[in-house]
């Protein structure tokens, strides 16, 4: 597979922290399951923004949802497909070189690649920064140069009391809940809190501040 995307953010291909990516949250977007796969479809933030616009345009045109099953692919996932296809570069990119590994490629569900759908995708993809890849009609690469966009905060599943632990660079690990915010000043407190509430949800500094603000407004942190 040819590589159109390049590195960004100082990250390595297939080893990008999820908090630096954006979840593609739209009807019909359901992550494929295989060794090294993720529970949700993630993409580079600017690619996710443009993909969402493209999916909405498809919905407006056809009155249906176009299904997506993969965006960003971890290095583990790349290794799986490389071995699965017996190191054949015609079917899988060499691990560490995949556009998926930069969060700059999207796979649609093959069953949705009807002649009408594919014709529309091919005629509109450039408008949204995408290009079809070779004979893989379900695979489109994002071709625009990296444009810094604040990643959408990952969804945080709160426990029954709405209490979760959050952490971010340049911020003190804290417990938040509806109307509640308390920093955890020592490793001992952090350890005790994560035993009760689960691992800290890590985000960017901006995401941390948003989570805190939402909690202090009396809401559970689910966005």
Image: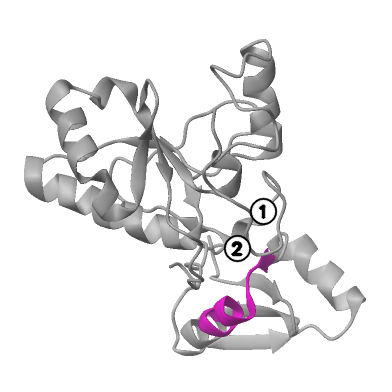
Is 210 a magenta residue?
Answer: yes
According to the picture, the residue beneath numbered tag 1 turns out to be 16
Q: Position of residue 177 (x, y in %)?
A: 56, 78
Q: Position of residue 29 (x, y in %)?
A: 35, 42
Main SS class of the magenta portion in the image: helix
Instruction: Tell whether label 1 touches label 2 (CB within 8 Å).
Output: yes
Identify the residue at horizontal 51%, vertical 43% (top origin).
4
Compared with 6, 120 (above or below) is above
- In-image side of 40 versus 199 (left or right): left
Quarter where residue 87 is shown? top right
Is 179 a magenta residue?
Answer: no
- In-image side of 110 versus 178 (left or right): left
Identify the residue at horizontal 75%, vertical 84% (top origin).
170
Quarter where residue 176 is shown? bottom right
Query: SS at mark 2?
Result: helix
Callout 1: few (<14), some (14-19), or many (20+) C-alpha neighbours within 10 Å?
Answer: many
According to the picture, the residue beneath numbered tag 2 turns out to be 20
Callout 2: few (<14), some (14-19), or many (20+) C-alpha neighbours within 10 Å?
Answer: many
Question: 49 or 181: which is nearer to us?
Answer: 49
Q: Position of residue 74 (x, y in %)?
A: 65, 40
Compared with 66, 86 (above or below) is above
Identify the residue at horizontal 20%, vertical 53% (top origin).
56
Compared with 170, 113 (above or below) is above
Query: SS at mark 1?
Result: loop
Give the numbered dot on residue 72: none
- In-image side of 23 versus 122 (left or right): right
Compared with 122, 217 (above or below) is below
Quarter of the rendering occupied by the N terminus: top right
Region rendered in magenta: 201-211
Question: 201 or 103: which is nearer to us?
Answer: 103
Quarter where residue 108 is shown? top left
Question: 18 or 113: which is nearer to us?
Answer: 113
């Amino acid at each position: 597979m040819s590589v159109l995307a390049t590195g960004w953010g100082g990250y390595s291909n297939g080893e990008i922290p999820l908090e630096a990516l954006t979840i593609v949250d739209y009807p019909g977007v359901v992550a494929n399951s295989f060794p090294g796969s993720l529970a949700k479809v993630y993409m580079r933030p600017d690619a996710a923004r443009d993909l969402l616009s493209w999916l909405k345009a498809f919905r407006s045109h056809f009155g249906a949802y176009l299904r997506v099953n993969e965006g960003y692919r971890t290095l583990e996932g790349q290794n799986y497909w490389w071995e699965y296809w017996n190191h054949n570069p015609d079917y899988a990119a060499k691990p560490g070189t995949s556009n998926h590994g930069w969060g700059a490629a999207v796979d649609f569900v093959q069953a949705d690649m009807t002649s009408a759908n594919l014709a529309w995708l091919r005629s509109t993809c450039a408008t949204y920064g995408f290009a079809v890849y070779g004979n893989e009609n379900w695979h489109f690469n994002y071709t625009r140069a990296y444009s810094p966009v604040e990643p959408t905060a990952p969804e945080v599943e709160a426990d029954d009391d709405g209490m979760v632990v959050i952490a971010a660079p340049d911020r003190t690990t804290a417990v938040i809940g509806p109307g509640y915010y308390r920093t955890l000043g020592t490793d001992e407190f952090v350890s005790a809190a994560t035993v009760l509430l689960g691992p800290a949800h890590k985000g960017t500094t901006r995401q941390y501040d948003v989570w805190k603000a939402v909690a202090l407004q009396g809401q559970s942190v689910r966005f």
